[in-house]
Image (cartoon, helix red, strand yellow):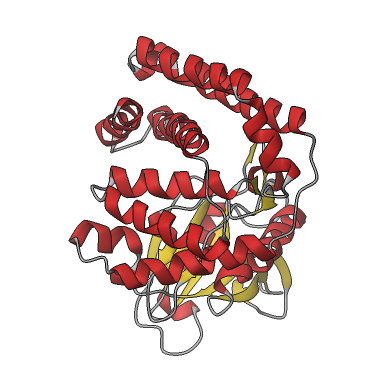
Amino acid sequence: MKGPPLSAKVAYLRRASNYPGNTARVDAIETHMSWLFLTDSFVYKLKKPIRYDRLDFSTLKLRHHYCEEEVRLNRRLAEPVYLGTVALTQEVDGKLALDGAGSPVDWLVLMRRLPAGLMLDRVLAQRTVEHNDVRAVAQRLAEFFISADRVSIASVDFCKRLEAGIQSDRRELLRPEYGLKRELVEHIASSQLAFLNKHTELFEERIAEGYIVEGHGDLRPEHICLKPESVIIDCLEFCQELREVDPADELAFLMLECERLGQPNVGDWFLEAYEKRAGDPLPRLLLDFYRKYRILRRAKIAAWHLNEPLSRDREHYAAQARRYLELAGE
């Protein structure tokens, strides 16, 4: 049987009376890939039935699989947060229920709700970041990378992945409808490709020394909760290749985001504490490469929002794409 449409599932999950306990209200947030339903103490995450090049949530079976994967992978850095998965069921009378007796028509990830005011992006905006909090997160990251599963890959294949990513980002950013500076995009991408060709030994050394791991893949301030215990949520569950990274890449991305949010010194704190705990003096040339690599990727993701016909924040995302590209020169 074909289940109810996404709109019916969203309408059901918007109603506080459909949740267990004395749920007072539900706040619904839509993203590219999911719907988030925030209750008083919990978050229920529903994946959209979509399919892209590296993401496939198009069937019930796949959505169930990736809900389970999201819980498994995120428990590595946020075990207390990820509580498990919950079925959205259709009962014999046709009505929907959370974890009912009927047949599952979708699946949700169940998480504890984190205090929004203690997420790193909020704390950066308020200029209230404390060095000790950053040190605790960086040490947690270092321990995570030390114990993470190592990735076995030939350096030529790893460099081909990076090259393909740069070429793909360049092609997308050069689309005329985005209105981005062609010369700037070309300059960043060309310099990145030239670096890959000239400094192959840097990547070979990192691979030979076992630094390529199955990491987080999307290490941004909005995914880091500082207190009461530092946790890092929302890793990329849908594509293992995107999680196969050098810690230098992850740290460079986090430093870039701290810089973009106006506090580059916080990125330096992360780097200092990570290097001390991990015993991994990250090559500065490599950090600069990965910083620009992430600049292209984040500019492309911002530009993608301009493809949405009903986007109400077009100028916001256009300005964000331009800002990322400007950071390459800074």
Number of callouts in the render? 0
Rendered location of residue 185, percent (x, y): 41, 17
Q: Quadrant of the N terminus?
A: bottom right
Question: Which quarter of the picture shows residue 150?
Answer: bottom right
Observer-nearest of 196 and 300? 196
Please say if 210 is above or below 83: above
Quick check: 141 above or below 2?
A: below
* Frontmost residue, 273 versus 246: 273
For residue 14, say whether it is visible: no
Q: Identify which residue, 261 or 72, lies in the foreground.
A: 261
Q: Nearer the viewer, residue 315 or 158?
A: 158
In which image quadrant can residue 266 be found? bottom left
Tell me, yes or no, if residue 49 can be seen here.
Answer: yes
Does residue 251 appear to the left or right of 90 in the view shown? left
* Image spot of residue 247 (x, y percent): 57, 50
Q: Residue at x 19, y 61 (%)?
A: 126
Question: Picture coordinates of residue 27 (x, y %)?
Answer: 36, 67
Q: Quadrant of residue 165?
A: top right
Instruction: Report the quarter where the C terminus lies.
Output: top left
Q: In this rendering, is residue 48 above or below 303?
A: below
Residue 277 image position (x, y, % from top left): 52, 65
At 80% from the left and 35% from the top, the residue drawn is: 154
- Horizontal side, residue 121 vs residue 7: left or right: left
Identified at 30% across, 43% down, the residue is: 260
Q: Outermost residue, bottom direction?
A: 21
